[in-house]
Every structure is written in C-alpha cells, then in structure tokens.
C-alpha cells in the first residue's frame, strides 16, 4: 500500500503538481493530495504524499521537515490515522445545537399559541362591543 506522510504549513499556492514536484526527488510517489476547502476550493495549507516504500517516506521526512517554501517552514512527518473523535468533530456541538433548536421551536410554538389566544380574545371582545 505504501507509506503516507503528512505535509503541513504548505503555501496556499501549492497544488497537486507542485507537491509531486517537491517530493518526487525522495522516491516513487504513489499518490499526492493537497487538501482543499470543499466550498471555496482553496487549499487548506496541508496535504499528504504516499510513497511506494517506507525508506523513501523516511528520507522525505528527514529532508523536507522544516524546509522553507515561499517563506513557510514545512511540517513533514509520518501520517497518523484519524482518531475516531476527529472524524466526528462537532458532533457533540451538533447534538446540543439540535436540542437547543428543539427547545427554541417549543418556545416559539408556545409563544405563538399564547399570541393566538390573545388575538382570539381581543376579537371576541371586539365583536361583543360592535353588537352592543
């Protein structure tokens, strides 16, 4: 499968081809990805490079970590698998947000009912005074 490395603090102008060009001198690259924002398409400033063998990946980490590109020192190390917690970031917030939302809807519904009752009473009072 190969050995994957993390490349952080990339200049935002660096794209896929630039990443391959920067890291290909260290060994055979199987895959290279610059992570971008799914809405804007702009680089998030980090990516991953997968080498065919571990020795190439280790060489790239040793030679590229701290190297300056466009005034930015790269942060290069072996990629770690995602934590289960990090794959669902914000899920706790989402739950509490949802519960707050339902509480808010209940409150709005109650206010609406109170308002409707008040309008109904005013209408009845208005009708009574017109008939008198």
Image: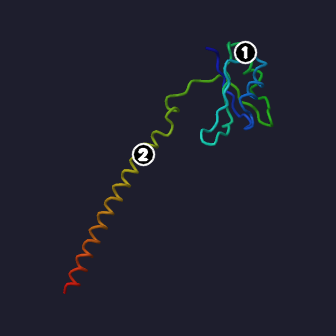
Residue 50 point in image, percent of width and height: 66, 20
Which residue is pictured at 75% across the width and 20% down the height?
Answer: 62
Residue 72 point in image, percent of width and height: 77, 36
| Quarter of the C terminus within the rendering | bottom left
124 above or below 18?
below
Q: Quadrant of residue 11?
A: top right
Which residue is pictured at 26% across the width and 71% down the height?
Answer: 120
| Quarter of the N terminus within the rendering | top right
Q: Badge 2, how many Cα within 10 Å: few under 14, some, many 20+?
A: few
Which residue is pictured at 74% across the width and 31% down the height?
Answer: 74
Cα separation, mark 2 vs mark 1, equals 47 Å
Q: Circle 1 — which element? A: loop
- In this figure, which colouring scheme has been used for the structure? rainbow
Q: On the image, numbered disc 1 is attached to which residue?
A: 28
Which residue is pictured at 33% across the width and 55% down the height?
Answer: 106
Q: Is residue 112 left or right of residue 69?
A: left
Residue 97 point in image, percent of width and height: 44, 47
Q: Nearer the viewer, mark 2 or mark 1?
A: 1
15 above or below 131?
above
Q: On the image, numbered disc 2 is attached to which residue?
A: 96
52 above or below 6?
above
């Amino acid at each position: 499968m190969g050995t994957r490395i993390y490349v952080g603090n990339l200049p935002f102008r660096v794209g896929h081809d630039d990443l391959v060009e920067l890291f290909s001198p260290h060994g055979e690259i199987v895959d290279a990805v610059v992570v971008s924002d799914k809405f804007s398409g702009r680089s998030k400033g980090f990516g991953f490079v997968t080498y065919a063998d571990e020795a190439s990946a280790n060489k790239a980490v040793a030679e590229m970590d701290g190297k300056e590109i466009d005034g930015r020192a790269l942060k290069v190390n072996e990629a770690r698998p995602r934590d289960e917690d990090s794959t669902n970031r914000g899920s706790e917030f989402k739950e509490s947000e949802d519960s707050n939302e339902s509480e808010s809807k209940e409150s709005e519904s109650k206010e609406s009912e109170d308002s409707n009752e008040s309008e109904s009473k005013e209408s009845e009072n208005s009708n009574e005074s017109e008939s008198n």
